[in-house]
Image (spheres, rainbow, N blue to C red):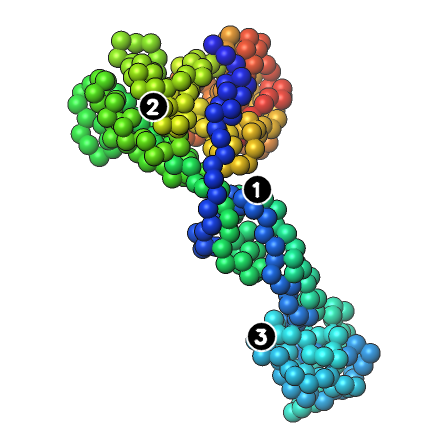
Amino acid sequence: MIPVSEALDHLFALAQPLGTETVPLAQANGCVLAQDVQAQRDQPPFDGSAMDGYAVRQSDVSEGATFHVIGEAAAGHGFEGTVGKSQAVRIFTGAPVPTGADRVIIQEDVRRDGDTITLTGTLDTGFHIRPKGGDFRDGQTVPAPKQLRPADVALLAAMNIPNVTVSRKPVVAIMSTGDELVMPGETPNADQIIASNSFGLQAMLRDLGCEARLLPIARDNRESLELAFSLCDDVDLVLTIGGASVGDHDLVGAVAADLGMERSFYKIAMRPGKPLMAGRLASGALMIGLPGNPVSAMVCGHVFITPVIRAMLGLGTQAAPEFMAPLATDIGANGPREHYMRGKVENGAVTVFAHQDSALLTVLAEANVLVIRPPKDGPQPAGTSVRCIAI
């Protein structure tokens, strides 16, 4: 068995960054920006009004001063003239500030009579002008790599960027294996269960920006497994679930080897997730064989699959980010393997669930962190800071 850190090193060596593609901005959310982008204009492109009111010269402003209104400026319809002494232009939010004006008096501080306004009461002290280029300047750069969020897409749109070059989305095939499995919605026999791991992993992969395909369930025989592998020739990553242990019906590793897989490692000194293997298929795709227990597969998804996908997208080779949190209650000693225990952070402290069986999806669904226990870690009292991974 190898430690988690060594397994990650092997996986990063196998996870080559993919190529790039150019996509319309409307399709870019969740993609990883692969090339720097430069703004094509200033934002705002002019000095603009931040309020509804009147554009005037600051030098003419005093309590009780009067101004002659000479025109109007609205968003998309600027005033073409120049504001002179004791003149004002009615202005609305988003409109260009007219030449000669350098302050907007909010309409609440004005009394209007025909084309004459009078400044009333204690004036608001703000100038209410958004300066040209106050948000970003023409040529300003959005650096790559960066996974684009909705706010990034809005920024690129404002920069007048219609298309972006992004890392190609990894194509992942998810292969559940086992005679005991049926799909959700089907009626299982008394000795069968519903396939769940593949759906959880597919959701995780889609959140990471992948194209994730669910293959038909492969049964515990060579013919079915070979057929499933034949459907993976055009993918970047194959995830098999189950069949990677050493039982009489665990055939995934043997079939993959017969089909040309070069194994990188097998078995990790961790709980849950010990029977994990990885290698490269003859097609060039990376293969990761996950354990069949549902919690084990999902924990390995957070610990291994997420960093691998980020590496394939060009986001670097880092383990899942960790943070420290104090224990809310005492916990007992750990065994000889690194343990990724399901827990929940509330009010700044983490509670480790009492039941850690790798088949308990209800516990995993309630958890929001994995608490990392070192091998042979002794009992720890409440208040001890422990390493956590958010899930």
Q: Is residue 367 left or right of residue 175?
A: right
Q: Which of pointers 1 and 3 indicates the residue nearer the eye?
A: 1
Disc 1 + disc 3, Cβ < 8 Å: no
First in sequence: mark 1 or mark 3?
3
Residue 385 percent location from the top left of the image: 62, 22
Q: Amino acid at mark 3?
A: Ala
Q: Write down the residue under mark 3.
A: 75
Q: Nearer the viewer, residue 353 or 89?
A: 89
Kindly identify the residue that appears in the image at 71 percent across and 75 percent down.
104
Q: Write down the residue under mark 1.
A: 145
- Residue 370, labelled with which disc? none
Q: Amino acid at mark 1?
A: Pro
Mark 1: give few (<14), some (14-19) or many (20+) Cα within 10 Å: some
Mark 2: give few (<14), some (14-19) or many (20+) Cα within 10 Å: many
Kindly identify the residue that appears in the image at 72 percent across and 89 percent down.
68
Q: Is residue 39 left or right of residue 27?
A: right
Cα–Cα span, label 2 and label 3: 57 Å
Q: Nearer the viewer, residue 21 or 339?
A: 21
Q: Which of pointers 2 and 3 indicates the residue nearer the eye?
A: 2
Picture quadrant where residue 324 is located: top right
First in sequence: mark 2 or mark 3?
3
Kindly identify the residue that appears in the image at 66 percent across and 70 percent down.
46
Above or below: residue 375 compared with residue 226:
above
